[in-house]
Image (cartoon, rainbow, N blue to C red):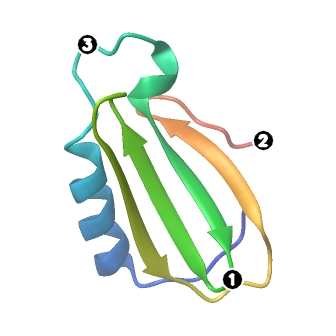
Amino acid sequence: MNIKLNSTTLAKALKSASKVISSKPAAPILEGLLLSASGGRLVITATDLMITVKIPVPIASSQEARTVNVAGTSNAT
């Protein structure tokens, strides 16, 4: 995923979304944030299966992409 966005806006969105993530999730996938880019925005999604938040962030990108990032891991290749 190659996007351009304001780092302060991203930091605020990530902080808000991460409040939903449980410290002891029922499944490992619930430790992560879903990042979806399309239509000029990045949507950060977090859930604990009872509460789900979706936070849109404006971006400069023509690509569509989705990835789940889990704290303490890296998807980089």
What is the crowding at mark 1: few (fewer than 14 residues within 10 Å), some, or many (at least 20)? few
Residue in front for this viewpoint, 1 or 35: 35
Camera-nearest label, 2 or 3 = 3
| First along the sequence among labels 2 and 1 | 1
Q: Residue at the location (51% across, 65% down)? A: 43
| First along the sequence among labels 3 and 1 | 3
| Helix, strand or loop at mark 2 | loop
Q: Residue at the location (45% across, 12% down)? A: 27
Quadrant of image for the C terminus = top right
Residue in front for this viewpoint, 14 or 75: 14
Camera-nearest label, 3 or 1 = 1
Image coordinates of residue 10 in percent, x first then y, are 37, 71
Camera-nearest label, 2 or 1 = 1
Disc 3 to disc 1: CB gap under 8 Å: no
Q: Amino acid at mark 3?
A: Lys
Q: Quadrant of residue 14?
A: bottom left
Quadrant of image for the N terminus = bottom right
| Helix, strand or loop at mark 1 | loop
- Vertical arrangement, residue 43 with respect to residue 33, above or below: below
Give the spatial CA distance, label 2 vs label 3: 28 Å
Q: From the image, tell me which residue sits under label 1.
A: 39
Q: From the image, tell me which residue sits under label 2.
A: 77
Residue in front for this viewpoint, 30 or 6: 30
Q: Amino acid at mark 1?
A: Gly
Q: From the image, tell me which residue sits under label 3.
A: 24
What is the crowding at mark 3: few (fewer than 14 residues within 10 Å), some, or many (at least 20)? few
| Helix, strand or loop at mark 3 | loop
Q: Residue at the location (24% across, 40% down)? A: 20
Give the spatial CA distance, label 3 vs label 1: 34 Å
